[in-house]
Each structure stands twice: as structure tokens, then as C-alpha cells.
Image (spheres, grey):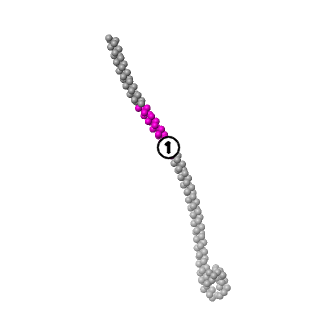
């Protein structure tokens, strides 16, 4: 009877240990399953992050290329502007020269006109070729009707 009771108690203890072991195994399996699911999610997130990183690298390269292109275009524009500025300065110099030349010519014409007026006053007393010679001495031309009154 004692042996039977010890065997029964031993069996009950074994069943209790077995039940706790199964419960523990179930909890461990649940936790392992949770960790596996979390790892799967982390892997998916990692793949997405890596994809985003590659996209950013492409965008970055693209932007760098665009920036490089813009810098080159700006450099060309700057060169063209400097060339245009030099051309404008050259043209401005020519205009100034032309204006100075025109002013000098106008002054010369004014002086000739003054000499003509002075010559006409003197020339009214002189007749014929002598008056023309006097006109030539004043800077005019004796055969030009503009200078002959």
C-alpha cells in the first residue's frame, strides 16, 4: 500500500511537473513567436529604410549633378556678361570718340562761320576773286555756295 501510494504521489508529481513544463513551453513558444514576428517586422522596416536611403542617395546624386550644371551655366552666363560688358565699354568708347569728333567738327564749323561773317564784313569792300581768296584764308572754300552769301 505504501508503494502504491508512493507511486501514485510520484505520478501526481510527474503530472504536475509535466503540466508546468507544458505551460512554460507554451509561454516560451509565445515569446519566441512574438520575437520572431518582431524580427520579421524589423526586417521589413530595415528593407524599407535601406530603400529610402538608396532613394536619398539617388536624389542627392541627382541634386549634385543639377547643382553642378547650374554652377556651370552660371559661370557661362557670368563669362558672357563680362564679354558683353567689355563690348559695351568698347562701344561706349567709340561713341565718346565719335561725339568728341562731332563736337570738334561742330566747333570747326562754328569757327568757319564766324570767320565767314567776319570775312563778309571785310569782303563787301572787296570784289571778285579777292573775296574768294580771303574766304579760303578763313578756312572756307571759295567755290562752295554754302560759304558764299
* Residue 138 at least partly seen: no
Percent across and percent down for residue 41 are 44, 36
Residue 14 drawn above or below residue 103: above
| Nearer the observer, 23 or 81 | 23
**Pointer 1 residue:** 55
Q: Is residue 12 left or right of residue 109?
A: left
Q: Nearer the viewer, residue 141 or 28?
A: 28
Residue found at the far top of this picture: 1
Q: Position of residue 112 (x, y in %)?
A: 61, 79
Magenta: predominant secondary structure element? helix
Relative to 31, say whether 128 is above or below: below
Q: Is residue 122 magenta?
A: no
SS at mark 1 in the image:
helix
> Residue 51 colored magenta?
yes
Can see residue 123?
Answer: yes
Residue 89: percent from the left, percent from the top? Answer: 57, 64
**Residue 31 x/y as whole percent:** 40, 30
Write the residue at 50% across / 43% down.
55
In magenta, the rendered stretch is: 34-59
Identify the residue at image location x=66%, y=87%.
128
Residue 5 found in image quarter: top left
At a point 53% along the width and 52% down the height, the residue shown is 70
Q: 22 or 124, which is in the foreground?
A: 22
Amino acid at each position: 500500500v505504501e508503494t502504491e501510494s508512493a507511486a501514485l504521489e510520484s505520478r501526481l508529481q510527474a503530472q504536475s511537473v509535466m503540466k508546468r513544463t507544458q505551460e512554460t513551453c507554451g509561454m516560451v513558444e509565445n515569446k519566441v513567436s512574438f520575437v520572431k514576428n518582431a524580427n520579421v517586422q524589423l526586417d521589413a522596416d530595415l528593407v524599407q529604410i535601406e530603400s529610402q536611403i538608396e532613394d536619398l542617395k539617388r536624389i542627392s546624386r541627382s541634386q549634385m549633378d543639377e547643382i553642378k550644371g547650374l554652377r556651370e551655366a552660371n559661370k557661362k552666363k557670368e563669362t558672357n556678361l563680362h564679354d558683353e560688358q567689355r563690348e559695351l565699354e568698347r562701344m561706349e568708347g567709340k561713341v565718346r570718340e565719335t561725339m568728341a569728333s562731332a563736337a570738334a567738327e561742330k566747333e570747326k564749323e562754328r569757327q568757319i562761320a564766324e570767320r565767314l561773317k567776319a570775312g563778309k564784313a571785310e569782303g563787301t569792300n572787296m570784289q571778285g576773286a579777292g573775296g574768294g581768296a580771303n574766304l579760303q584764308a578763313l578756312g572756307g572754300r571759295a567755290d562752295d555756295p554754302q560759304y558764299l552769301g
